[in-house]
Amino acid sequence: MVLFLDFNPFDNLLCILLGISFTVWFTLLLVFIIVPAIFGVSFGIRQLYMKTLLKIFEVSGNHWAFLSFLAIIAKEPTSLEEEIKEIRRSGSNRDLDSASEFEMSDIFYFCRRGVESIMDDEVTKRFSAEELESWNLLTRSNYNFQHISLRLTVLWGLGVVIRYGFLLPLRVTLAFTGVGLLVVLTSIIGFLPNGRTKNFLSEKVHLMCYRICVRALTAIITYHDSENKPKNGGICVANHTSPIDVIILASDGCYAMVGQIHGGLMGVIQKSMVKACPHIWFERSEVKDRHLVAKRLSDHVEDKTKLPILIFPEGTCINNTSVMMFKKGSFEIGSTVYPVAIKYDPRFGDAFWNSSQFGMVSYLLRMMSSWAIVCSVWYLPPMSREEGEDAVQFANRVKAAIARQGGLVDLLWDGGLKRGKVKDTFKEEQQKLYSKMLVGTQEDRSRS
Amino acid sequence: MGSRASTLLREEEIEEIKKETGFSHSQITRLYSRFTSLDKGENGTLSREDFQRIPELAINPLGDRIINAFFPEGLDREDQVNFRGFMRTLAHFRPIEDNEKNKDPTASEPLNSRTNKLLFAFRLYDLDRDDKISRDELLQVLRMMVGVNISDEQLGSIADRTIQEADQNGDNSISFNEFIKVLEKVDVEQKMSIRFLH
């Protein structure tokens, strides 16, 4: 590694210096980051870093409040029937018993509701990053702040230097180390015969590599209620904000992953992981076949030696302010469900993956150039389907528990609305309700 | 800078919109934020598709008619509305404040006056903008609101009865003045207003 260029003593010196700094660099990396990752201990460096950052944010004089929690308009919680009756009552000379079927003022209800949803609706704001009211010194979080003082600019400039000059290279190195080790070691373990030794080693290797990846993102995670951690033969469900959710959960416990086989680097990782322990990967064509998917999942949970399955029932990434409709597939299988709530702290970096805005690689680079990823994970007590409860009701019950624990809004809307259109059945329900108001009076009249 | 705030609203523009619509400074900036988040094409205007992407509006039986109100020029598919037009239409739903009632009578009528709110509702019925609600137009709106749940005959008789009660000059359609007369007791100010939180 050291080149001898006799005619230029400065180059010689430069090479020696480079060599020394690389060695120092890697030793530090090894001692402070990789070794603790292997043994699952922590020096507390990341916690210290987080405290320092908070102090700096305070110094820059910001007060925290989150814009997305502040609604623009006041929405009346009255139902269709109540409100139309009220409008009619105020406009009518006649008494209610012989109320007419239809009034021209009925459209006021639909009119106002429509314009209310144009000004502020519950769904579309879940598919873009949560807005902060104060600035956390990241350009990407700077939405409408027009007055940036000199002090803030200086801090921001320093931040850029530290994040891109020091943190990013460090993290990228760690990421490559973590992923590389994962691929190599799981392939090696794949050669062992199935048995206790293989499972034990596979567990250790997976945990170690995920912990290195956690440090590669400078993720500072607080786990709550670890006594409820998922056990073999169960299904772990969690709310979905980004692909990083997987790394966060898998660095604290071993899971069987479920997903589609990708090409490229992702595919290589997936193929080598499955050599060491059984994950459930589907070909693209198999994903559409719901029976096949359900069969493979239930076969897996029946085998108690296999690890618990990790599933994200929302089916897509949501921006961590709400939990959207859970797809009922995983709740039909009939095994114990272990709900997990994940809540990110957006002050240090926004973890939401807006797949229409960024590809995977640019998303990961953004993650690695943020300050840190700070989140809390709550392991909720296990739940099973009760008597007389169908899969959809069970799914909603689990969803409500996760939303409550994580402080997220519980929505009935489908996360698929990110890309697709809303079903007509919702409109038909409203039409039916209104028709009852018109026709209902007809029936009453014929009775009297 | 985030791509969303790429065309920040200038102070002069905010002042002009304030004068025209009566919204406050903070309401205008919040609604501008909303406008840009709906503007997926990021070209400073909204198309009909941008509105239809709002699920709560898409399931509203009168959703399409409400979207129409933002595009006054016609039913051309290529229509775009800019922020001024957006605010001008939304201004109809601003609550009427007490101090406005005693304003200078020579000034032009504010967009959120009772008459203008009624005009907004009238235009939802009057698709061809001929200032008359014909029987057909009334039937169309009724059909949108009830879906498939009521028969043609029943709907027809409801429409006939409504026109009969409202029509005063015997032309078998409802003019804007007749519309105002029918609704003279209804609390339009409250029912066609949206309250802002700050």
Image (cartoon, coloured by chain):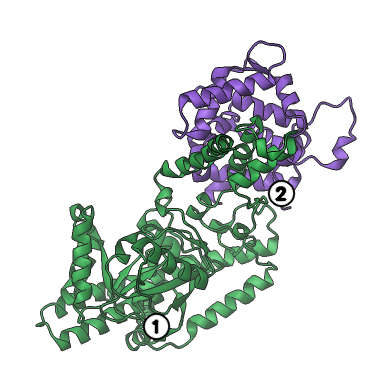
The residue depicted at 47 percent of the width and 56 percent of the height is A412
Residue A285 x, y percent position in the rendering: 18, 52
Q: Is residue A60 left or right of residue A315?
A: right
Chain drawn in green:
A
| Image position of A273 with respect to A260: above or below | below
Q: For the residue marked with disc 1, what is the amino acid?
A: Asn
| Image position of B116 with respect to A230: above or below | above
Report the residue marked by disc 1.
A228
Task: Tell me, for residue A166, which label it has, or none.
Answer: none
- Quarter of the image holding residue A98? top right
Q: CA distance from mark 1 to mark 2?
A: 44 Å
Residue A157 x, y percent position in the rendering: 58, 63
Q: Is residue A326 left or right of residue B105?
A: left
Q: Secondary structure at mark 1?
A: helix
Crowding near the residue tagged with mark 2, few <14, some 14–19, many ≥20 C-alpha atoms within 10 Å: some
Q: Is residue B110 left or right of residue B164?
A: right
- Residue B101 in sight: yes
**Chain identifier of the residue bearing label 2 in the image:** B
Front-most of A84 and A111?
Answer: A84
The residue depicted at 48 percent of the width and 23 percent of the height is B153
Q: Secondary structure at mark 2?
A: loop
The residue depicted at 19 percent of the width and 84 percent of the height is A199
Q: Give the residue at the far front of this rendering.
A: A448
The residue depicted at 67 percent of the width and 29 percent of the height is B120
Front-most of A94 and A417?
Answer: A94
Q: For the residue marked with disc 2, what is the amino acid?
A: Phe
Front-most of B88 and B82?
Answer: B88
**Chain identifier of the residue bearing label 1 in the image:** A
| Image position of A287 with respect to B13: above or below | below
Report the residue marked by disc 2.
B196
Residue A23 x, y percent position in the rendering: 35, 82
* Shade of chain B as shown in the rendered figure: purple
